[in-house]
Image: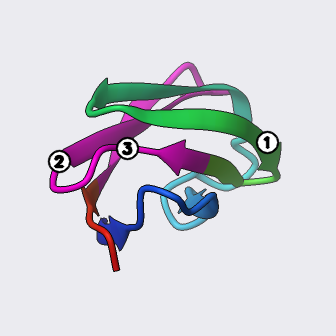
């Protein structure tokens, strides 16, 4: 995902794994990692196959990368990345 976020905004973003998981496979655990930039993870939660993360901060004109890493009941591990361009609107 490539999106734009204002540095003053606190917004929620959803990582949806429902189309990726096999039948009867569930998410056992998840991590939210800020791998680039200065955004802050305020909180995150799982609801079935969806992980919602609330992000704040970031510096104007930077690029941020936030990764959602899951481990499933089948022992699979996968990452999805969210790329954010931080810009005053």
Q: Residue at x 39, y 36 (%)?
A: 67
Q: Looking at the picture, how far across and down is residue 33, in whole percent?
A: 44, 25
Q: Secondary structure at mark 2?
A: loop
User: Which residue is at 18% across, 48% downward?
Assistant: 63
Dividing the picture into quarters, in which one does residue 75 lie? top right
Task: Label 1, secondary structure: give it.
Answer: strand
How busy is the neighbourhood of tag 2: few (under 14 within 10 Å), some, or many (20 plus)? some
Mark identifier at residue 62 = 2
x and y percentages locating residue 32 in the rendered image: 53, 30
Residue located beneath label 3 in the image: 58
- Kindly identify the residue that appears in the image at 42 percent across and 56 percent down: 7
Foreground mark, 2 or 1? 2
Q: Is residue 87 left or right of residue 75?
A: left
Residue beneath disc 1? 45
Q: Is residue 63 left or right of residue 15?
A: left
Examine the rendered structure and indicate whether residue 11 appears above or below residue 59: below
């Amino acid at each position: 995902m490539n999106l734009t976020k204002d540095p003053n905004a606190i917004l929620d973003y959803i990582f949806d794994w429902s189309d990726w998981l096999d039948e009867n496979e569930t998410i056992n655990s998840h991590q939210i990692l800020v791998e680039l930039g200065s955004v802050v993870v305020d909180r995150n939660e799982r609801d079935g196959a969806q992980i919602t993360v609330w992000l704040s901060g970031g510096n104007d004109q930077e690029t941020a990368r936030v990764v959602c890493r899951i481990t499933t009941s089948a022992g699979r591990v996968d990452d999805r990345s969210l790329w954010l361009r931080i810009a005053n609107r």
